[in-house]
Image (tube, rainbow, N blue to C red):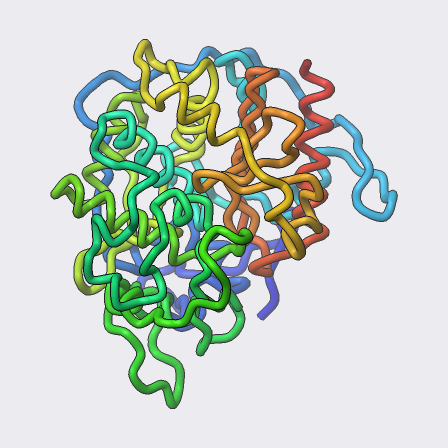
Amino acid sequence: MTSYKNSEPRPQIMRGSPPQLRVPFADWDRPPWNRWSFQHVREILPTAEVWRGTGPESVFPQVPQDLGGIGFERLGGVPTTVEAFLDDSYTDGLIVLHKGRILWERYFNGMTERTLHLSQSMAKSVTGAAAGCLVALGVLDPRALVTHYLPELAQTAYAGATLQQVLDMTTGVRFSEEYTDPYSDVGKVDVASGWKPAPAGAEGFPGHVWELILSLNFRERPHGERFVYRSIETDVLAFCMERATGKRLPQLISELLWQPMGAAESACFTVDRAGYALAEGGLNASLRDYARFGSLYLDDGVFNGRQIVPAAWIKATQTGDNTRFGEPYTLTTPNGAYRNQFWIEDVSRPVILCRGVFGQFIHIDTSRDLVMVKLSSWPDFLNIELGIDTLRMFHALANEIT
């Protein structure tokens, strides 16, 4: 069964009692099932709460504007409008936040203000922000070796790597990020994290994420030489954070980010069989709370009346090295970089991105006091055309607003 756009009839996935069209566990994140499952992860996988606390919700004033008619050119020179592209790109939610005010907010495919949507790899940026808070508190030192926090990794390819190299994904550890290969390293993460059953004929797959990390024994280049996207680096970072604080990741995100920013909803992480919250992609949160998180990187980290993310950490996150950044990453951001678990769209401008497979984006432009969030359920893990077109849409919105 193929996927469907918002303008097309929705199949009766998981409707009825009992549902007749049930989501298959082995393919819950694949089309068309992901159009339902990305908003219902707690009904598929075990999760741990990221508590919002008992404080008041931070409020965004609303200044509604109809931005759907703004035009732009898609890749190949095809003209479109923002509204049409939202349909073409399987959008579940979009919010445009300018100077702390909601200008435009749209929900599709059954999503609502309170729906928790899977972040995929935007969770990496949330983890990186919490790490920045711990650095400011003196709990973590980016210059320290990873083995300072996790001595067990001395017997792995992470020996000699610094925490900063893990934050920037410039270690030399070999890790295959082939999403469609169930036997790749990232395929093993799916099994270790509890997201998927082991594929047919698989032997010796790790039982949980920590076990997988301990199995990474091959270094393919010197640490620090170049950026290569490895999802497991965020889990290594999270284990360092947990070991240094004695707290689990959902509690750290709650205390350092979710409660201080006045989140509207408690979020959640998927957890593996050892209770570990998947830092690299298991966060689920509401659209507005993703916008709140993006806003933490505006105004030097002051939000909701508090300094939340340290200003020095934000400045460092906006500063990247394009010389370590090559294909395939330059296909969507030619002058980009990666720093502290964030994507830098262009090293000449203060614009950073949180990105996740299947079309998850937070676009943060500090010079324009602008945050835009797009949550999606693409049919593909990666789609270069849709990725480039999404950035073009953000640029068209930004130019019209400011």
250 sits to left or right of 132: left
Position of residue 175 relative to residue 288, above or below, is below
Q: Nearer the viewer, residue 33 or 218?
A: 218
Which of the image's four quarters has the N terminus? bottom right
Asked if residue 128 lies left or right of residue 268, the reply is: right
Of 348 and 226, which appears nearest the observer? 226
Q: Total label count?
A: 0
Q: Nearer the viewer, residue 89 or 214?
A: 214
Place of residue 92 in the rendered image (x, y in percent of width and height, measured from the top left): 53, 43
Q: Is residue 30 left or right of residue 276?
A: right
Residue that extends furthest to the bottom in the rendered view of this protein: 201
Q: Is residue 292 left or right of residue 64?
A: left
- Looking at the picture, how far across and down is residue 313, in whole percent? 40, 26
Residue 113, x across and y down, in percent = 41, 31
| Rendered location of residue 68, percent (x, y) | 69, 28
At a point 12% along the width and 43% down the height, the residue shown is 246
Where is 141 relative to 215, above or below? above
Specify the quadrant that holds the C terminus.
Answer: top right
Residue at image x 35%, y 21%?
Answer: 310
Say whether residue 52 is visible: yes
Residue 124, located in which quarter of the rendered image? top left
Question: Image quadrant of residue 346?
Answer: top right
Using the rendered image of the protein, determine whether residue 21 is visible from the camera's viewpoint: no
Most extreme residue toward the right, as rendered? 77
Residue at 25% x, 29% y is: 256
